[in-house]
Structure formats: C-alpha cells, structure tokens
Amino acid sequence: MLRSGLKKCYSIRDNSGKTVSMSLCLKKDSEGALRPFWYARFVVEGMHETAILCRWKGVPPADGNADSEGDAEFEESRLDAEQQLQLLLLKLHGHYEDFINQCRLYSRRFENEIKVADTWKLFSDQQDLDRCSVNHVNNLKRMTQRFVDFLSSHHPEITDLEKVTGAVLNEFLSTVCEEYHLSNRSYNEHLKLLKRIYETLLPYSEANEWLKRVSLRKENDAISREFFTNEELMQILDVSKKTDLLIYQMVVIASCTGLRLKDICYLKWGSINLEHNRIHLTTYKTKQDATVGLWPLLRKLLDSLWNPDVRPEDYILPEAAKQYSHNSANLLERLRKVLVICGYENARKPCSVRALQHSDLEQLSKEETIERVESALEKSDWTARRRRMALLYFRSYMKGLTLDEIARNMDRAKGGISVYLSELEKLSHCAIIRRPAIHLPDPRKGKIMAEIPENGQRARRGSLRGWHSFKSSFVINALRAGVTLDTLSKILGNKTVSVLFNHYVKIDDNHMMEAFTSKTPEFAQ
C-alpha cells in the first residue's frame, strides 16, 4: 500500500525517449504498519516501480501519508531522502530497464538480502570490469574471497553482509596482514576494496561509516624504479630485436612515448596521426589526454607496421593486446628475460632463458621469416601432405596463435606441431619458435627485483627495473632536451606536475653540474 509524497515530483527522459516520473512515498506492510523507509516511486508508461532510499527517523505523520508532516526529525530525514532521489536521477542516463535494476539493488541494501557468500557476484555486477585485465579482476576476486573465507571461519554466525561491524573488519585486516605478510601497499589494496564493496552494496551501513574513518597506510616501503641510460636503452633494443620481436616493438613505444604498459598494449591506429607526426590518446589510469610527438625510431616502427587495410579500431600490436588481457605478467617476464641477457640480475627468481642447439638460426622479421620458410618448403623433397600440414601449422603460428591454441583448434597433439615447426627451422635456417644460442654475461648492472627480507614481508614493492623504467627514461631524456615539467606533464597526461617530479624525475650529479655550469649568469662569467 503506497502513500505518495507529491510535494516534489520529477520528470526526466532516458536515452530511449521514455518519460520517467519520480517522487517520494511511504509504504505500509500487509498488517497496515508503516515500513521504516523512504521510497522512490517511478512511473513510466503506466508502470510503477519503487526503490528504498533511506530510513526515516523520528515520528511520522499519523495518517502515514508522505504529503503530511511529521516531527522535526522526520522532516530532516525527508531532506536526506530527497538528496538520495537526486542521486538516482543523476544515474538515469541509460535505458529505464537498466536503471530499474540499479534501483532494485538499492532496495536490497536495506532489506538484509545481501548474503556474505554473494558478495563478489553482486559487487562485480555493479562494477565496470570489462576494461580491466584478467589479472586485475582475479586479484579483486581473490581478495574478496579472503574476506568471505575469514567471515565463514572466524564469524560463522554472520551470514548477512550488513551485520558485519567495524570491529570485525578491523579484525579481518589485522588477520590478513599477519597471515599473508602484507606490505602497506597490499594492506591498502584490501582496504580500498572493502570501501568499494560497502560503498556499492551497503552505503548506509555501520561498516561503511567505519570504513570512511579509516585512513590508508603510508606506503613508506615503496621505492622508485630505476631508469635506463641511453647506452642501456640501446643495448636493450639491440638484444630484444634479436631475441623477442614483440618486446622490441613495445620497448620502442615505451622509451619514445613514456606510456604505461596498458596504454602501449591497447594503443590503436585511431590514436596515431602520421600526417602530423604525433600520438593522441586518453590514458587508462589517469583518464587524462596525452599527446606525444613521434621520434624517428618510433616513426620508423609505425611505418613498418602500417598497411592500407588497418582500421582506426585495430590495435597496433594485436599480440600485445591479447597477451595483456589474458596475462599481463607474462609480458613483464619476457622483458626480464631480455634484461637478464643484458646483464641484470633477477633477485626474486632466475629467469629461464633457453639457449638452443642451433646457433646458426637467423632471427628475421615476420615477413622475412614467412618468405624464407615458404621458399625452403618449395625446394624441399617433402611429400605433398607433409608440406601442406607444415605450412598450415606454420601460418597459424605466425598469425599469433600459441601451440596450445593450434593443437586445440586442429585437434592435434601439441608435441607433433612443435616437431613440424622445429623441422621447418632446420630447413629454412631461421628462428620460428627457437631463439639463437645466447651467452649470459655475469650480472653486473644491478638487480631487476628489490631485495626480499627473511621474514617474508616485502620491504619494497614493484620491480626495480621493468616497463615503468622506460617512462622515467623518457622523462629524463625529454627534460635534457629542454622540455619543461609543465609541458611534459601535459604530454604524458599526468594530473599534476608534482606526481611527475616526485616519481619520475631522477637527475644524477653529473647532469646537475652540467646544467648548472651551462647556465652561468652574466655577472659570474
């Protein structure tokens, strides 16, 4: 039974052109008692829907009608309800049906229907996780499952998410820190996830109010990544070009643009303006516009990758985009292998760099490899069937499919496909799945990963040298070329200059003295 509040009524059109009327109302239960909530009432094309906004307080009007006035505390809660109604109006940008689904979740928040076991499902349904990497989504899911498992083991009596108190959340954070030896950064990730969960599912709960008062820990165990000098960059480019062509292409983009790994992998041809020699895109992390000019090395790479059939929505490096969405950590591991070859030491675990028996294999470009192999097959004495199968496997592999994917698509054994490709390598004398034999030098250039204390807790986070190091290198090279911090901040899409200065600017003593002496004022000459 409804008691509509018609003092304020709103009308709005959704994207499909439907007119939605909204107002406040009160409801009674089957026994005629007034329910303790303010409701939003929606009317569209003669159909009615309601959603809980918040609890009313004080003494309501005797007739239970929202048009009537209650005591001062009740009228104050009316103002809160109208604010929540305004917030709902701001969300009405899509179709009405999608909006109603949001409103139904809004109602469930107040009716104790959110079970602890359903936390991840309900939370993920309300988040835009499509643009997030699989690895990031899995991390969120794993942290959520830790929370659910903690409640089931330490507080089995709590089955509704709303019954979780601030004391229980504090106990969870303390327990998970002790059990998993979390650094301050990992602790903050768990805390931020809890804040997002309760802000999304239970914004008016006691637990959410407690979480708002809890501050993030200072990440005093974080260190800045080391940057690569120009000599080191030239060596990394040379080694990666010979050992891993995709990593070479990504290193060129990273060192010439300062873009983050995700921006590199998802860079599309629509962001490239070859006519004006620049890249313009919106960064994924900061959501800021970034415009970067094309240095000659990057322009040469883009010219080699471009063809008349590319579309604006096509990725520049499709293999990198696919790898990032599936497992971004693999791209970092491939870069570490290159760094190990260059003489850096991996402190966390040894990289497996495969030295091969066939030291005479040439490392050619994709087009040159295809031409060499097809030419060698034509001149071979292989049977027609053997040539046909080898060519089928080879072309699939060169399209970017892995051995597992080829085996699954063609219903063949992975080992048999690998044998075919190995035989093609011997036949054409060029590398397909193998790399030339590599001599690993003694690691003298520093570590790739930070030291890990004996107690298991990370004293520092992140790689000392990784994909982000190329951004520091780009910043330093741009500054030495005379680009100001303000301009560089706009080029890279950083929100503030301080972020750029504190995290990416690293000037050694030699460069500082060179810059100081080259700008000697006239009076001091």
Image (tube, helix red, strand yellow):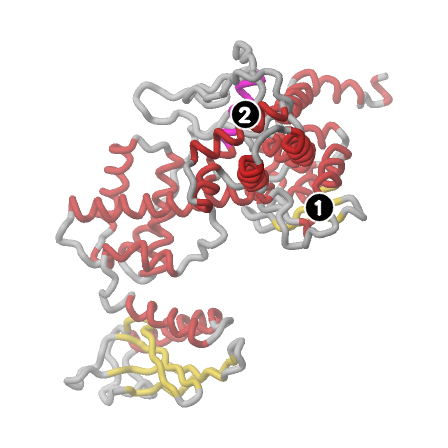
* Disc 2 + disc 1, Cβ < 8 Å: no
Q: Is residue 145 visible?
A: yes
The residue that disc 2 covers is 434
Q: Position of residue 379 (x, y in %)?
A: 67, 29
Assign a secondary structure to mark 2.
Answer: loop
Numbered label tally = 2
The chief SS type of the magenta part is helix
Callout 2 crowding tier (Cα within 10 Å): few <14, some 14–19, many ≥20:
many
Q: Is residue 469 visible?
A: no
In this rendered view, identify the residue nearer to me: 387 or 497: 387
Which residue sits at x=55%, y=11%? 441
Q: Position of residue 498 (x, y in %)?
A: 60, 38
Which residue reaches farthest top?
Answer: 442
Q: Which quarter of the rendering shows the N terminus?
A: bottom left
Assign a secondary structure to mark 1.
Answer: strand
- Identify whether 150 is placed above or below 95: above
Span highlighted in magenta in the image: 332-342
